[in-house]
């Protein structure tokens, strides 16, 4: 029997590497470890329990909560019964949750704790099919007397009884599973409209997992940190797919606050994080170094300079002189090694990043200190992998070559990237129209991203295909491309650019409170709040310099030089997912922002130097209020002389 | 800088509660033990064999430096338990060490008492009569000495229930002065010799001569075997290491937590159910036990013969207190650091000042060196209290923290 | 009367010869006065700064060493006394400057340990400068004795008693009548309050240290005149500690009465019981007495019962 | 859920006509009340009303001159604080009384000390304690056996340490202070220190938990957290709680029964609603603020 489903892979692992660790959770102060055989036993018990509670083949089971072994087990247990687990973002609001649960016709929900149960109860009325709730953590659940709420322990108890009465049930159910069966629904929070439920089969996930495990030589002694949302395809592929295929160990952190400590303790050998996290870490490195003693700073600068020179070359096994090698070795002892250690990356063999473009400085920083960081390009619809940078062919501005078994092409007209592979999703659940739009008859998937394949055969992504526009001067306008360039500056947290159908490009920027605040303190710029800081002329001046540098970069590119940023404004508040300005994965919601900040946008294309802006906002404690301020508009110098050259 | 902690995680409480949280620290300790047990004895032996070092220098190193260092470490461990962990100041350490020394003496000579009777001629005849068989095993003697000192310590610790802080410090002075008085006035303690001096009898351990000398026939000739300095050193080292391990175990477990609770806030400690008297007395008992072992060690291995009132005078108490303060209150490592500091500084000064004087042609008397020593001690204590009240151990810890966070400051 | 009772009552039985008994009492009281003087300096510092000044005994030695040293250099006695007073004031300033100001807000136990360090330093410092041989200190107190009612009394003893009485009177006036004295008391009662009404804490410290230095000088002079100036002086001065325990750390009358009790008690014990147990019980009797006393009355003779608050 | 609907158990602690004097000053005069099992019981009153003294009397720190205290049905007289702890009374303090030299974990672990009797002693209590003569003979040996195990940190002792560590970790998890597990408590902000102190008390698994102004000096968010913990403790473990609190909002929200003290006398008692409406209380306590308001206007 080939192991073509996760429950079957679990059986295989329990057989072949029974005592080896499968999953760990930092709980009650230590890393509680569960071996593959224990994991299998747990999954079996839960599966029996679910069956005893009436879960049928094809039922949908929502999984709500942080990364916890119990939730992963519940997922696989559901799969063992032929039910379909639907992981849901644990921080999604009630309306989002309600939509997903309704759309997926969920009848059963496994949640982490009271908080999630409360949310589920809230949406229960509008979700008629939702019948049974299960919680893992009994804290605060004593007073819930509803008979449809059970603890996972009760389920497990029931499971044990059910098992005693139905020997062989589990094995039979597992055997019924086929690779072509549906493994899960993953809802993608699109930038517009309602989330779409991507239907992935075992074949999709397992083929991509096997491909990547082989390609990247992933072994069964890897340690990873399972900290990204379970509802995200990446976690599904890394913490279940690759984990089950390769047989390595996933580690669940204790809580969100202790993430960094947990990262350091585990010291993963294999680490994935979106660019944002690497960016934050680098920022904190720089901030902490500034408080360091002089000698240490000098040492740091000296060796980081050296790393910049030869680090990447050494990583890529290129030829480097003996002296430089020795110096790099010294640097490894004094700076890089300790640095990696404090960041929890001493043992890392592979680091991946994806999801957004990463700043070249950030990228080079990590690579130069000897971390094999690579970019990949993927989608939920592709079961993650589309392209990946092969070892020694790593560039900051590309996302790598097509993975084995993935076909790739770029539509010459729309510049849209398309791919085809075994990982391609089955369909969008109950949304044939979208399915047809995205997936062609012969299996090609529209990514919606514009890009091109460069002379190395690497894919380069510019922007969302639909967002790429044209300025009135005929120049191509790729907002995300500009925004990413802006966001690579430490002071800029988020940027939104405008320009399609306009005379020039303009930018709306929200500053990075930590970085700018730190800078302000050192430069005696006093401020009391984000709003005040963002309005400081000194800050404007710093940002203007950043923008002018972007303009200079753009001037070098013939197609984009017309898209230089002529005017900008600093927003009085951070762009926030709670206000709907960003998606949960921190992507800009353009349409929403256009409406919300129309006054500012008008001012950017008008002549005034100040505009009053008032927006509704959600405070940390959940209250809503109005955030208002006068926002200054500033001009930036254009480089290369002729932004309107093509207009004539 | 040297720390690579990433990936050091624990999957069970037993491991998580180990003495060392970090692998590097554990290796560091094994390294130090390796040096102390193997590298030093073998290295010195080879140096002497190779003619690179005079045999007398080697013996000086062992007998005058290493042994003293170990004895002081042991005493500092003891006082640190009482003062550093349980928060009870004691100025009677030397007195307790003396009890240990005299107990060891009495047990090793069979607990003699004097039987006086008139002989046939009507003259008064004195005769020493042993009450117990003499014990010649130094390890057993040290344990017995510790046990006796424990009892004495508990008696003098009794007032700690009612009195605290300085008052208690003064009360422990009572122990110091009373005990020292006993050492020169209670004849039974020193077997009634007029000089009130006690002398260690010959002892053997595992067939090795430890004290005194032994004459054996070898190849038909009488050969006198003197104890090897290495033997004494290794016995003391093993003893100190063992008791340091015991001390560490106590302070990291429930006993230590009870002591520290009493130290940090005795009222709150009572309200969580800690019995103050029992806890403090236990600290006195354990601390005195350690001091007693230190005293026995001082007597058996380091001095061989001593006069109680002189060897255990109040300055000795202060010296141990200084070790604890400079080393670091509430730290096992600190006890060793402090002992090393206070032991080595005078040795250094004794060599350094005459040398310095010689350079300028100024004769430096021993008395002057001693004065300078006292002044430096006094000044150092004050400087430490001002700069780093938690002592060398704290500096060590800060340094370690720096290395762990390197290249970051925090 | 059995041997047992003879032993127990030995200190009383010395009054069988009442002249001898009185002599013992007087010499005991004299020693007590000396202890009181040391304790007095201690109480001053404790009241003003909460510092348990272990170095007070050494201060006595140091002052006496200086005085003896100056006289030994041929300086006239009144000038030598003035010079020594100057040294003690200078010392107070140096202590404040180098030590006290750096230890503000530290725990009392730390301050206490610091004074142990100071004691070590000071004794060695004094002996380094003036040598460690025993010095005679002759400040013109008449030698010899007189014998009222057949009791031998040394002039020195009388003088010491008188000087101590005078000193206590002066201090009482100083504390109750002068502005500085009242300020000192204010500091003792409440540091914060004292600061808020503009009393400079550092000045206060210098003054108390200087005053207790001078008190130490008086004590040192008396001791020195009696038995010469030598290192053991500082050890004798340690006996001020049990005195303090008896009298309470903050009470001047306590220090005086405590001193007299200790002095008298240990002398009677020594003369009475000493012969039975080999003598020299003076070495520890005071401490044991204080310890036993403490167990029954932890707050001292004049202290108030402490109500612990949580 | 409203607390008035809740069911309470029997009387856990009964205070009868307690009078406490310091010298000539009367701190508490003739106060009586009853605390029932599973109740959240509040003692309120203006400053100096004798609230803290009352708690001190309950846990044996002060000994009242008159009156009796009946706890779990047994009247008691002179009880030492550690004996109170042994009978299941735990306590937090107005000014945090943590062991500042220790980490959060160690502080919580000290709360387990009473439960860590040691394997030999446990055997003694189970088997030997009831045998005449033998109990006296074996006690020292058993005690010393535990002591030796402790000092070697070996075998059964290590197991015991591990078991209690787990219990302590559960408390840490309950109070959500995992991230400060190894931090010396002296370095923690005030609000967290209060939480650790509650943790130490919870680790004792008390039957009666006395909280002396658990929310004093906290900001709104910290107060809300603390309220939640107090209610959770009461819910989850069924612990009876007696607390002193100044924040009337908090008291009215969470307590089942309120006693009002003024100048050491009880002036009112009842449910929060009853007390709130009591004219004496308004005069003595709320009235003060009310008058000031009027003056300001």
Image (spheres, coloured by chain):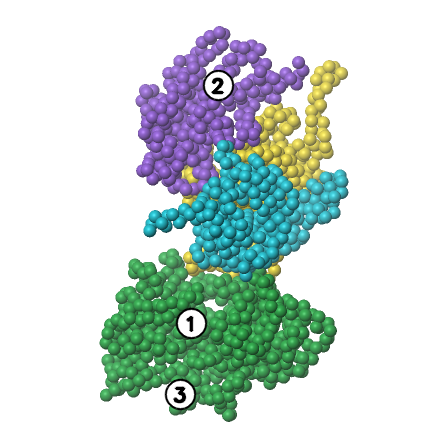
Chain colours: A green, B yellow, C purple, D cyan
Q: Which residue is mark 1?
A: A577
Give the answer, above or below, for where A77 lies relative to C154: below
Q: Could you give the CA–CA distance between mark 1 and mark 2, rounded to whole angstroms?
A: 86 Å
Horizontal arrangement in the rendering, residue D193 relative to residue A634 (left or right): right
Q: Nearer the viewer, residue A169 or D37?
A: D37
- Rendered location of residue D249, percent (x, y): 46, 54
Q: Which residue is mark 3?
A: A415
Q: Are marks 1 and 3 in contact (CB under 8 Å)?
A: no
Q: Nearer the viewer, residue A374 or A591?
A: A591
Horizontal arrangement in the rendering, residue A168 relative to residue C6 (left or right): right
- Looking at the rendered structure, whether the residues under marks 1 and 2 are on a common chain is answered as no
Q: Residue at x 50, y 40 (%)?
A: D264
The residue tagged with tag 3: helix, strand or loop? Answer: loop
Horizontal arrangement in the rendering, residue A128 relative to residue A302 (left or right): right
Task: Count every numbered label the image shows and give the total.
Answer: 3
- Looking at the rendered structure, whether the residues under marks 2 and 3 are on a common chain is answered as no
Q: Which residue is mark 2?
A: C29
- Rendered location of residue C273, percent (x, y): 59, 19
The residue tagged with tag 1: helix, strand or loop? Answer: helix
- Rendered location of residue C115, percent (x, y): 44, 35
The 10 Å Cα crowd at callout 3, few under 14, some 14 to 19, many 20 or more, is: many
Q: Are marks 1 and 2 in contact (CB under 8 Å)?
A: no
Q: State the quadrant of the N terminus of chain A.
A: bottom right
Horizontal arrangement in the rendering, residue C266 relative to residue A555 (left or right): right
Q: Which mark is residue A71?
A: none
Q: Could you give the CA–CA distance between mark 1 and mark 3, rounded to whole angstroms?
A: 30 Å
């Amino acid at each position: 029997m080939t192991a073509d489903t996760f429950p079957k892979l679990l059986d295989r692992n329990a057989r072949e590497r029974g005592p080896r660790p499968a999953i760990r959770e930092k709980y009650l102060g230590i890393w509680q470890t569960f071996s593959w055989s224990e994991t299998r036993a747990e999954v079996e018990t839960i599966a029996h329990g679910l069956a005893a509670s009436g879960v049928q083949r094809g039922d949908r089971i929502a999984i709500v909560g942080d990364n916890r072994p119990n939730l992963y087990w519940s997922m696989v247990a559901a799969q063992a019964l032929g039910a379909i687990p639907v992981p849901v973002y644990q921080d999604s609001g009630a309306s989002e949750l309600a939509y997903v649960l309704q759309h997926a016709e969920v009848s059963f929900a496994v949640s982490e704790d009271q908080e999630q149960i409360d949310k589920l109860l809230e949406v229960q009325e509008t979700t008629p099919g939702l019948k049974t709730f299960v919680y893992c953590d009994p804290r605060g659940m004593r007073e819930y007397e509803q008979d449809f709420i059970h603890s996972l322990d009760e389920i497990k108890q029931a499971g044990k009884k059910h098992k005693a009465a139905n020997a062989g049930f589990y094995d039979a159910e597992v055997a019924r599973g086929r690779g072509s069966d549906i493994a899960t629904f993953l809802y993608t929070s699109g930038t517009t409209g309602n989330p779409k439920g991507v239907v992935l089969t075992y074949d999709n996930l397992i083929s991509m997992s096997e491909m990547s495990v082989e390609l990247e030589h992933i072994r069964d002694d890897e340690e990873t940190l399972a900290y990204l949302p379970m509802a995200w395809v990446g976690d599904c592929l890394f913490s279940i797919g690759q984990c089950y295929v390769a047989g390595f160990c996933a580690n669940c952190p204790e809580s969100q606050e202790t993430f960094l400590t947990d990262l350091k303790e585990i010291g993963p050998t294999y680490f994935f994080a979106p660019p944002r996290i690497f960016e934050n870490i680098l920022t904190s490195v720089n901030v902490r170094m500034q408080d360091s003693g002089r000698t240490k700073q000098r040492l740091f600068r000296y060796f980081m300079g050296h790393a910049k020179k030869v680090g990447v070359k050494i990583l890529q096994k290129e030829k480097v002189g003996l002296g430089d090698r020795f110096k790099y070795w010294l640097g490894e002892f004094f700076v890089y090694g300790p640095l990696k250690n404090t960041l929890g990356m001493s043992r890392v063999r592979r680091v991946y990043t994806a999801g957004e473009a990463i700043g070249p400085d950030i990228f080079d920083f990590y690579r130069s200190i000897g971390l094999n960081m690579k970019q990949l390009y993927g989608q939920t619809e592709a079961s993650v992998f589309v392209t990946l940078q092969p070892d020694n062919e790593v560039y900051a501005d590309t996302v790598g070559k097509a993975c084995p078994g993935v076909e790739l092409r770029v539509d010459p007209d729309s510049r849209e990237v398309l791919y085809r592979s075994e990982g391609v999703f089955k369909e969008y659940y109950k949304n044939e129209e979208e399915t047809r739009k995205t997936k062609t008859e012969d299996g090609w998937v529209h990514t919606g991203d514009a890009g091109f394949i460069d002379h190395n055969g690497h894919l380069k992504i510019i922007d969302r295909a639909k967002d790429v526009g044209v300025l009135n001067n005929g120049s191509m306008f790729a907002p995300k491309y500009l925004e990413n360039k802006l966001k690579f500056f430490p002071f800029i947290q988020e940027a939104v650019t405008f320009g399609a159908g306009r005379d020039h490009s303009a930018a709306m920027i929200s500053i990075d409170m930590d970085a700018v605040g730190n800078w302000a303190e050192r430069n005696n710029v006093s401020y009391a709040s984000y709003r005040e800081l963002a309005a400081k002329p000194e800050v404007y001046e710093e940002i203007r310099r950043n923008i002018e540098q972007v303009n200079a970069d753009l001037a070098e590119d013939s197609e984009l030089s017309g898209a230089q940023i002529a005017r900008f404004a600093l927003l009085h508040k951070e762009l926030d997912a709670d206000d709907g300005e960003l998606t949960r994965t921190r992507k800009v919601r353009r349409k929403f922002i256009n409406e919300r900040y129309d006054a500012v946008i008008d001012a950017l294309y008008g002549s005034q130097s100040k505009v009053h802006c008032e927006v509704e906002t959600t405070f940390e404690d959940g209250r809503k209020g109005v955030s208002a301020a006068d926002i200054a508009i500033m001009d930036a110098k254009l480089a290369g002389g002729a932004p309107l050259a093509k207009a004539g | 800088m040297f720390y690579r902690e990433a990936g050091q995680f624990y999957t069970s409480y037993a491991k998580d509660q180990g003495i060392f949280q970090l692998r590097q620290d554990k290796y560091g300790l094994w390294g130090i033990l390796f040096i102390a047990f193997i590298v030093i004895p073998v290295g010195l032996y080879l140096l002497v064999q190779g003619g690179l070092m005079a045999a007398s220098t080697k013996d000086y190193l062992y007998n005058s430096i290493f042994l003293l260092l170990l004895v002081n470490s042991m005493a500092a461990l003891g006082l640190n338990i009482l003062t550093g962990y349980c928060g009870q100041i004691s100025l009677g350490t030397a007195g307790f060490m003396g009890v240990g020394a005299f107990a060891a003496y009495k047990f090793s000579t069979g607990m003699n008492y004097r039987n006086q009777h008139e002989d046939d001629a009507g003259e008064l005849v004195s005769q020493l009569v042993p009450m117990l068989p003499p014990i010649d095993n130094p390890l057993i003697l040290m344990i017995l000495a510790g046990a006796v000192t424990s009892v004495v310590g508990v008696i003098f610790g009794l007032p700690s229930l009612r009195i605290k802080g300085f008052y208690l410090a003064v009360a422990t002075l009572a122990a110091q002065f009373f005990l020292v008085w006993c050492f020169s006035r209670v004849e039974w303690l020193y077997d009634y010799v007029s000089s009130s001096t006690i002398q260690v009898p010959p002892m053997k351990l595992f067939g090795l001569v430890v004290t005194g000398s032994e004459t054996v026939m070898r190849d038909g000739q009488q050969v006198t075997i003197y104890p090897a300095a290495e033997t004494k050193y290794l016995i003391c080292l093993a003893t100190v290491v063992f008791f340091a391990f015991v001390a560490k175990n106590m302070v990291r477990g429930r006993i230590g937590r009870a002591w520290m609770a009493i130290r940090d806030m005795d009222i709150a400690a009572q309200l969580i159910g800690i019995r103050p008297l029992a806890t403090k007395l236990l600290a006195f008992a354990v601390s005195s036990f350690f001091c007693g072992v230190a005293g026995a060690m001082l007597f058996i291995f380091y001095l061989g013969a001593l006069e109680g009132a002189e060897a255990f005078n109040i300055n000795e108490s202060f010296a141990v207190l200084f070790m604890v303060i400079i080393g670091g209150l509430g730290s096992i490592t600190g006890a060793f650091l402090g002992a090393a500091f206070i032991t080595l500084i005078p040795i250094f000064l004794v060599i350094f000042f005459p040398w310095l004087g010689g350079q300028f042609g100024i004769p430096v008397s021993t008395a002057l060196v001693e004065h300078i020593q006292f002044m430096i001690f006094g000044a150092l204590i004050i400087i430490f209290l001002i700069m780093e009240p938690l002592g060398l151990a704290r500096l060590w810890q800060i340094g370690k923290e720096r290395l762990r966070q390197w290249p970051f400051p925090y | 009367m059995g041997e047992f009772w003879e032993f127990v009552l030995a200190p009383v039985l010395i009054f069988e010869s009442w002249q001898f008994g009185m002599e013992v009492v007087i010499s005991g009281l004299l020693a007590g006065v000396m202890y009181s003087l040391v304790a007095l300096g201690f109480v001053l510092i404790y009241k003003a700064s909460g510092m348990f000044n272990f170095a007070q005994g050494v201060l006595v030695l140091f002052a006496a060493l200086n005085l003896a040293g100056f006289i030994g250099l041929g300086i006239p006695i009144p000038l030598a006394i003035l010079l020594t007073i100057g040294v003690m004031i200078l010392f107070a300033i140096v202590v404040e400057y180098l030590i006290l100001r750096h230890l503000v807000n530290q725990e009392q136990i730390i301050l206490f340990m610091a004074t142990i360090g100071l004691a070590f330093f000071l004794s060695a410092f004094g002996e380094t400068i003036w040598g460690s041989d025993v010095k005679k200190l002759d400040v013109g107190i008449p030698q010899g004795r007189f014998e009222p009612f057949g009791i031998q009394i040394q002039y020195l003893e009388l003088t010491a008693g008188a000087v101590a009485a005078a000193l206590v009177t002066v201090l009482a006036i100083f504390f109750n009548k002068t502005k500085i004295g009242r300020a000192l008391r204010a500091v003792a009662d409440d540091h914060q309050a004292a600061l808020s009404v503009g009393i400079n804490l550092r000045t206060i410290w210098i003054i108390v240290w200087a005053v207790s230095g001078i008190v130490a000088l008086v004590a040192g002079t008396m001791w020195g005149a009696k038995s010469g100036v030598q290192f053991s002086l500082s050890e004798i001065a340690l006996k001020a500690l049990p005195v303090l325990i008896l009298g309470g750390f903050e009470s001047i009358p306590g220090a005086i009465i405590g001193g007299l009790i200790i002095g008298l008690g240990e002398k009677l014990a020594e003369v009475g019981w000493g012969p039975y147990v080999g003598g020299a019980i003076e070495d520890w009797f005071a401490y044991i007495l204080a310890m036993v006393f403490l167990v029954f009355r932890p707050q001292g003779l004049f202290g108030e019962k402490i109500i612990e608050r949580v | 859920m409203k607390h008035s609907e809740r069911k309470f158990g029997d009387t856990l602690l009964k205070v009868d006509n307690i009078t406490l004097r310091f010298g000539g000053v009367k701190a508490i005069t003739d106060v009586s009340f009853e605390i029932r099992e599973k109740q959240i019981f509040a003692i309120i009153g203006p400053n100096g009303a004798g609230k803290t003294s009352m708690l001190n009397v309950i846990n044996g720190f002060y000994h009242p001159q008159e009156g009796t205290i009946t706890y779990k049905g047994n009247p008691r007289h002179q009880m030492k604080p550690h004996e109170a702890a042994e009978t299941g009374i735990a306590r937090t303090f107005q000014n945090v009384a943590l062991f500042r030299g220790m980490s959060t974990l160690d502080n919580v672990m000290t709360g387990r000390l009473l439960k860590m009797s040691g394997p030999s002693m446990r055997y003694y209590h189970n088997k030997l304690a009831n045998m005449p003569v033998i109990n006296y003979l074996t006690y020292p040996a058993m005690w010393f056996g535990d002591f030796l195990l402790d000092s070697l940190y070996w075998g059964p002792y290590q197991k015991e340490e591990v078991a209690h560590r787990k219990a302590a970790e559960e408390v840490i998890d309950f109070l959500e202070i995992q991230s400060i597990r190894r931090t010396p408590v002296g370095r923690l902000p005030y609000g967290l220190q209060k939480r650790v102190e509650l943790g130490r008390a919870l680790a004792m698994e008390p039957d009666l938990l006395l909280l002396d102004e658990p929310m004093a000096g906290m900001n709104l968010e910290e107060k809300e957290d603390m309220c939640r913990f107090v209610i959770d403790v009461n819910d989850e473990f069924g612990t009876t709680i007696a607390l002193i609190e100044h924040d009337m909002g908090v008291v009215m929200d969470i307590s089942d029964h309120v006693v009002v003290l003024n100048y050491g006398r009880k002036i009112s008692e009842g449910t929060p609603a009853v007390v709130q409406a009591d004219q004496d209380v308004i005069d003595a306590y709320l009235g003060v603020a009310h008058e000031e308001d009027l003056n300001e206007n």
